[in-house]
Amino acid sequence: MTRTSPGPTVGVVGGGQLGRMLGEAAAPLGVELVVADPTPDCPAAPVVRDQLVGGFEDESTFRELAERADVLTFEIELADPDVLERVAEETDTPVHPAPGTLRTIQDKLVQKRRLAEAGVPVPEFRGVDTAAELREACAELGYPAMLKARTGGYDGRGNVPVDGPEDVEAAMADIAGPAMVEEMVDFERELAVMGCLGDGERDTFPVTETVHREEILRESVAPARASAAVRERAREVALDVLDVMDGRGVFGIELFQTSDDEILLNEIAPRPHNSGHWTIEGCHTSQFEQHVRAVLGEPLGTTELRDPSVSANILGDVTQRQDAVMHGEQAVLSTERAHLHWYGKREVYDLRKMGHVTMTGDDRDALLSDVRDLRDGLTFDDDSR
């Protein structure tokens, strides 16, 4: 695609932190971004060409976005794939990844069935709609098990552990809708691979180790502290996942390394992912630049590692929703090879992702300790200062 001023335009459904970082990555390429988000002055707004205010199912907003863009993409799975597909056909504006891919991934049960059919290794799972069905499934899968809402879950929301028969009724009540239950995987560590689909190209970023607590990603370590054989197997599984996806873009592929070093797929995000934020400093091409390149059909950038890297999420630590005022950032800014990323969210609440800190260096264990210390020194709670 030729460059002019203004340059080619990517329309993005969603204007959260991923849209913000897409905008930051697109600018050096001469690419304009217009985002659509229901929140006025969303986090992406300061760094993109324009924001359209409209919901994730608002056909008129999608149509206006398509009319202003050379290609459409999305940074949130709440985008309605049927509306995207209809608007794309009416305006002759391509959508990447394909709406069909989004439709498959939005429903965790459909996602798992499709991947299992393709031969991708997955944990044992069952679809369940009632407590009786959950009880029957757990009798087959064993306790404990993990109950997941089929749609809408993120950052641990929509995931409920079922430790024993006495938890069945309450777990189904928590989900309050169609669900899927999986065997509880005895894993050595959780891994993630950012997969890339371009115009006839496919690639992966280095395999990342992800550290979760309360079902929320806390830290990412890259490359993963796993054997070369395990990392290669994770990459192979990720490439098999990409073969099932339609359309171009970056895909966040979450995996389990089991206690006997097998690799099982956990979930997929059809967009850049929290576990790949470290690539901004750690790779020659970030996941965000790669997504922009991919959806425009331009050559993919190298996924080569620049430096081992560790990222830690900055999460809200307040009990009530309030204006976002962070304290303690001077320690991050005064630390060599530490990089602060602020997402520009106006309000903070408990466990909301507000930013991240990345450090680069050679010793991943030392980096992990250091980045945790820096992150833990950040707070939104005035009383804890």
Image (cartoon, rainbow, N blue to C red):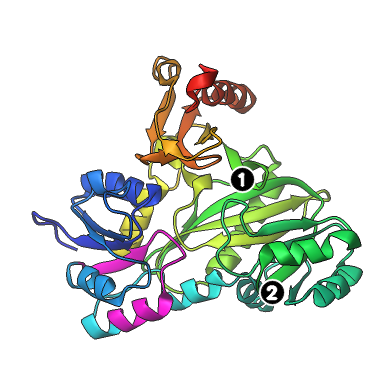
Residue 301 in view (yes/no): no
Residue at the spot x=83%, y=64% of the render?
168
Horizontally, residue 13 falls left or right of residue 45, namely right
Mark identifier at residue 216: 1
- The amino acid beneath tag 1 is Ile
Helix or strand or loop: what does disc 1 sit on? strand
Of marks 1 and 2, which one's residue comes earlier in the chain?
2
Indicate the quadrant containing the N terminus: top left, top right, bottom left or bottom right. bottom left
Q: Nearer the viewer, mark 1 or mark 2?
A: 1
- In the image: residue 18, left or right of residue 114: left
The residue at 20%/71% (across/down) is: 64
Q: Nearer the viewer, residue 18 or 28?
A: 18
**Crowding near pointer 1: few (<14 within 10 Å), some, many (20+)?**
some
Which type of secondary structure does the marked residue at label 2 adopt?
Answer: helix
Question: In the rendering, which numbered label is found on residue 108?
Answer: none
Query: Where's residue 115, x and y in %?
Result: 64, 73
For this rendering, which residue is in front, 332 or 376? 376
Number of on-image labels: 2
Indicate yes or no whether the magenta region holds residue 275. Answer: no
Of 99 and 162, the residue lying toward us: 162
Residue 250 sits in quarter: bottom left
Q: Which residues are magenta?
A: 69-88
| Residue 191 location (% of width, % of height) | 64, 48
Residue position marked by numbered label 2 in the rendering: 116
Q: Which of the 4 image quadrants contains residue 347?
A: top left
